[in-house]
Image (cartoon, rainbow, N blue to C red):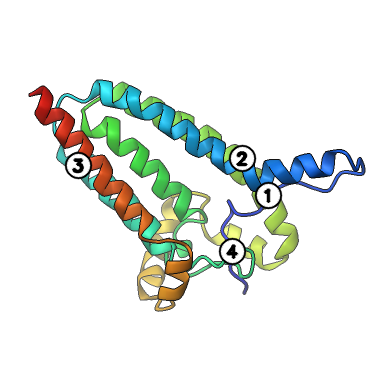
Amino acid sequence: MKNVEAGNGNGLTESTNPMLNPLRRIWSKELRGKIRIWGSWIVIPLYLALVHQIPNWAGILTLAVGTGLRFWASGYLQKESRLCTRGPYAITRNPLYLGSLLVALSMPLGQAQWVLTLAVALIFLALFRAIVAKEEAVLATKFDPDYGIYRRQVPMFIGLKSLWNLPRAIKSHSFDMQTWRTNRGWEPVCVAAAIFGITSLVAYLRG
């Protein structure tokens, strides 16, 4: 089988209108991902305004799991060349997105902001489901019939099949350091350290 995560195709088909094609390429390759990143920076000041304590254990654990999942997935994902089915891809079709969701949840959860934690979860899931659904249509065509089989065996995010597939995911020994470096697998660790460090500093200064 071949190796790509849903979340790496652009989900766009070439238009018959030649004027739209350059705009679609700019959107898919340059703007779409950056807009999500810029949006996260806008949320940071709002989060810092809520900080009143050093992150609790629930927030720290969620941050660690989300970071570990992204770190783990970075050693398997070979963008647009193979269909990933091993490692974390055996328990979720989108470990990078799921890891990002957990990291985002860790911030309000760590401050015991339960309503905000639920709101963040609902917003992220709505956004990710829409993005993944569009990109999976591309992958289903590109990797037919392998992707259809994989989709039936592994949940989009998490589910009972994830627990069933966990032993196979743990036993997988195809983690590749070169792939990890190419995917900048160190970035999630830096982000997690920054979140914990800055949050703790703000809580200390306000304490």
Residue occupying the point 24% across, 48% down: 193
Disc 2 marks a residue whose amino acid type is: Arg
Q: According to the image, label 3 marks what residue?
A: 197
Query: Residue 10 got which mark?
Result: 1
Query: How many residues crowd around disc 3 within 10 Å: few (fewer than 14), some, or many (20 or more)?
Result: some
Secondary-structure class at tag 2: helix
Q: Mark 4 or mark 2, which has the lower sequence index?
A: 2
Residue occupying the point 43% across, 61% down: 184
Cα distance between the residues tagged 4 and 2: 17 Å
Disc 1 marks a residue whose amino acid type is: Asn
Contact between marks 3 and 2 (CB within 8 A): the answer is no
Q: Position of residue 140 (x, y in %)?
A: 70, 58
Cα distance between the residues tagged 1 and 4: 12 Å
Q: According to the image, label 2 marks what residue?
A: 32
Q: Position of residue 53 (x, y in %)?
A: 14, 28
Cα distance between the residues tagged 4 and 3: 32 Å
Q: Mark 1 or mark 4, which has the lower sequence index?
A: 1
Residue occupying the point 61% across, 37% down: 130
Question: Is the residue 176 above or below the residue 157 in the image?
Answer: below
Eye-nearest disc, 4 or 3: 3
Residue 55 visible at all: no
Cα distance between the residues tagged 3 and 2: 29 Å
Residue 182 as seen in the image, left or right of residue 170 = right
Query: Residue 55 got which mark?
Result: none
Eye-nearest disc, 3 or 1: 3
Question: Is the residue 181 above or below the residue 65 in the image?
Answer: below
